[in-house]
Image: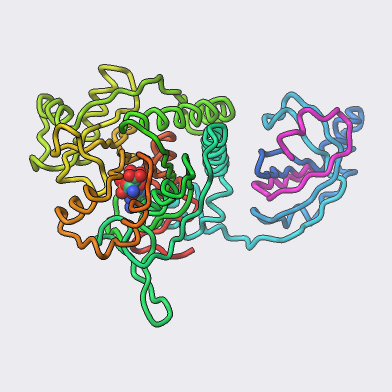
Amino acid sequence: MIKNLPSVENGTTVRVSGWVEKVRDQRYVQFVVLRDESGAVQLVNGGVLREADPENPRSDVLVPRTTTISELTQGSFVTVTGELQHNERVKLGGVEVQIETIEVVTKSLPDNPVAGDSNIDVRLDWRFLDLRRPEQNLVFRIQTTLLHAMRNVWVDRGFIEIQTPKLMASASESRAELFEVEYFEGKAFLAQSPQFFKQMAQAAGFGGIFEVGPAFRADHSFTSRHATEFTSIDTELSWIDSHEDVMELHEELLVAALTAVKEKHGEEIQKLFGIDVTVPSRPFPRIPLAEAKEIVKEEGYEIPRADADMDPEGERRISAHVKKKYDHDFVFITDYATSIRPFYHMRHADNPELTNSYDLIYRGTEISTGAQREHRVEVLEAQIKEKGMDPAELGFYLDFFRYGVPSHGGFGMGLNRVLMLLLEQSSIREVTYLFRGPTRLMP
Ligand code: AMO
């Protein structure tokens, strides 16, 4: 890989493969900047003889300029062999390769449909070219590290990884935002969340489980944080006393993830995004929803509806308050009103108006919802009816609770939102491999 070249001994013959980023075709010397997934290196044709024989001013012309290099188009994939030379003056890693052979594996068309200043829609049309940019490559290496670190936590704690089906016979969250698809003679729905089937693993006696998979929402909005398909990070664990246990697991996972990202990519993130990765301290601040609303009200912003969730402006303001007061990027907003939470959230034992639930806000945007689940089937049935739903339609789900189930809880977290906020990007489009929105199904 190109990034390893600086540690190779001077004078060694090396073989490198990658795509052409730039060609500088001068009269007596040709330069190519070659990039692969790990970095970039300068290739030279012609410079070596000039340096090798400074007494002979004409020696450079002894190296023939090759038309292969003159005709190289940006983006072509090539394999080159040549002598590696350490040269402090070369900005790219202090090394260059004196080209001996060059094989053009595939030639790129000469026009480049994306330029540095292309807008996001053009870049998404040509996502495979956009992804060649080092910043974009880094996003997905960060994503890999982040998920790997979280997986380590789960695996160390003995959690089981599951894959729940994405084709469903019923809605998985609410009837809103539901994609319907033809399914032979009938119809099916795309999973909005693995909610019911991750809870099934509790009745199955799996204990802790996790899933990283797609979730679909027929959400006709064009905000920077909504997609119609996103990657949901879900976990569920048995034998909890309250949502506090879920929040502790949540903190542990995020601290492990951000520590790993900082250790592995901190320097590069600083270089390419100008950002210092901060590892949050534990515990993260916790503020009950009612109190959070009071705080933002005192600071001049009233959430429009009294019974409502925080709105985006409220989330921004409470985050700003927490940043100022606790110097923390995360805040758990807890104890949501029953009226704005789904039927499966457990309610406070001493106040049925409130749930054992939370949202996690990161730098002003919600990234997660978590809760303790109601595991007593008769209470669950009553809550379903209270929400105006028909328990018969949820019979398969209620069965999970009819044959014994431990107390349990968990959360769902949007991977793309975490990356967007971590890297201070303007939209999840920037950090999603292939974004899906109301007007984007291609590529
Ligand atoms: P919720 O609906 O709040 O909760 O979703 C959890 C998290 O998923 C992300 N998310 C989205 N990301 C991008 N585009 C969307 N359209 C979108 N919708 C949601 C957000 C959000 O915080 N079953 C519960 C979780 C649980 O209780 O375990 C659920 O799905 O980051």
Vertical comparison of 321 with 133: above or below: above
Residue 430: x and y, percent? 44, 46
Q: Nearer the viewer, residue 247 or 402?
A: 402
Residue 355: x and y, percent? 21, 38
Magenta stretch containing residue 413, yes or no?
no
Does residue 111 appear in this view?
Answer: yes
Q: Nearer the viewer, residue 17 or 389?
A: 389
Q: Quadrant of the rendered structure where residue 32 is?
A: top right
Residue 427: x and y, percent? 37, 45
Magenta stretch containing residue 29, yes or no?
yes
Question: Which residue corresponds to the image point at 9% horizontal and 34% vertical from the top-left?
Answer: 302
User: Considering the image in quadrants, where does the N terminus appear?
Assistant: top right
Question: Which residue corresponds to the image point at 71% horizontal and 29% vertical from the top-left?
Answer: 90
Q: Is residue 398 left or right of residue 60?
A: left
Vertical comparison of 174 with 379: above or below: below
Q: Is residue 56 left or right of residue 229?
A: right
Q: Nearer the viewer, residue 200 or 122?
A: 200
Vertical comparison of 222 with 144: above or below: below
Q: Nearer the viewer, residue 191 or 353?
A: 353
Q: Quadrant of the rendered structure where residue 249 is?
A: top left
Does residue 225 appear in this view?
Answer: no
Residue 152: x and y, percent? 57, 34
Vertical comparison of 34 with 381: above or below: above
The colour style of the image is rainbow
Residue sitting at the far bottom: 185
Question: Which residue corresponds to the image point at 45% horizontal and 49% vertical from the top-left?
Answer: 201
User: Magenta span covers which residues?
Assistant: 1-30
Q: How many marks?
A: 0
Q: Quadrant of the rendered structure where residue 190 is?
A: bottom left
